Amino acid sequence: MKTFIRNAWVLTMDEQMTEYHPGYLLIENDKIAEIGPDEGPSLHLKDLLHSADQVIDAEDGILIPGFINTHTHVGMIPFRSLGDDMKDRLRKLLFPLEADISEDLVRASAQYAMAEMLLAGITTFSDMYYFEDAIADEADAMGVRALLGETVIGQETPDGDGHAYYGLKMAPAFIKKWQGHPLIQPMLAPHAPNTNSKESLQAVTKMALEYDVPVMIHVSEMDYEMAEFQDKYGQTPIEYLADINFFDAKIIATHCIHAKNKDFDILHKHGVGVAHCIVANTKAAKGVAPIKDMLTANVPVGLGTDGPSSGNRLDLFTQMRTFAYAKKTYNQDRSIFPAKTIVNLATRGGANVLGLSDKVGQLIIGYQADITLIERKSLNMHPIFDPYSALVYSAEASNVEAVWVAGQQLVAHKQLTRFSEAAISQRLQAQMAPFNAKVAEILRQE
């Protein structure tokens, strides 16, 4: 199958930040076969037009690598807008509600979340939650690229038969089932250093090395987490993890809001990537992570939405814009983090963090055809002097015209190609009744 996309403003996000305006891109099966300037009626372009199975006129839209969401919890759509302004919402509201969340609700939520991400141009996401094998089924059906890990936590979980650390128990079978899938990569996902024992964290490292899978963990996120490790060990959580050899595995560290200068050397030394969720972090008043210092220390950084209860919107346009506003204000420097750098974090940077930099995050020949087309016809997209600035400051998810994952077009004309949005929404609503009753019960007790 050959798809020829022409008349596009192509942002390759390669090392040279090459642009073609106008440009073309040829998809052959699941890979990018050609890319270059669309220089009018050349003989080569005529040959491509005649040999293609599908020709798409981008109408001067912006063609970029698919956005990469480095951290989320797709099973948490039912929590969106719930207790947004509540103090200590995690322990007072989220953990109690999650105690008996059902597999059917998680499945419906995951499909809904993936639909929302695809329509926002996200082609890859990394997820930590419960019933992760069911989420993998839904991701497979949706056709998205995903890194998935069952939460490992020292408390009873809804799918764990009353046992703590169920994520460790189910991981071997989960990994064996999905390892080698073209789009789905299993991983291990300990919740956080303060919600796991030393023994469980070391077991995660051992298993990750045995099965050659990555590990995602929330770390240096909470002020009480920082205080606990300082009081117990005289260390930051990152120093503690280094001391127990946790970083021997391939680690994706989420948040790192309170990471210190001494932590950056540890992260760089061990090749740890940071999933930065600026909207969730600032919404919860947790602080602004020192991303400038991390990048100066050559720590890979990508952008994440966090879960729909934490960041509410599952799109990277919101993340990019909030990142720009927060970092410029925090550093009191309008020129810091130019738009081109921020778009890089949302694409190539995310690929580096997730260990996928050899296949996605750039529009170059031989890479997977994970591609997003953003239209320029809407009123908010004119005029454009700088396409990167337009993506960061002007564009919205509603401007996403088309999306491909591994060469398969999953969004066309701003609509899903494989599923009905109405049916996805109806499926979720049908599973919400027991959850809503539980919400009402907990809120009555507050």
Image: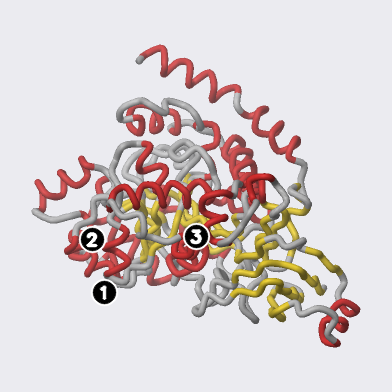
Residue beneath disc 1:
269
Residue beneath disc 3:
346
**Direction bottom: furthest residue:** 43
* Three-letter amino acid code at the position of disc 3: Ala
Q: Is residue 165 left or right of residue 229?
A: right
Residue 238 percent across, percent down from the top left:
23, 59
Q: CA distance from mark 2 to mark 1?
A: 13 Å
**Direction top: furthest residue:** 444
User: Is the N terminus in the top left, top right, bottom left or bottom right quadrant?
Assistant: bottom right
Mark 2 nearby-residue class (10 Å; few <14, some 14–19, many ≥20): some
Residue beneath disc 2:
241
Work out whether residue 96 or residue 393 is closer to the camera in this orientation and state it: 393
**Direction right: furthest residue:** 50
Q: Is residue 388 left or right of residue 325?
A: right
Q: Secondary structure at mark 2?
A: helix
* Three-letter amino acid code at the position of disc 2: Leu
Work out whether residue 223 or residue 160 is closer to the camera in this orientation and state it: 223
* Three-letter amino acid code at the position of disc 1: Lys
Residue 412 percent across, percent down from the top left:
77, 54
Q: CA distance from mark 3 to mark 2?
A: 27 Å
Residue 150 percent across, percent down from the top left:
46, 51
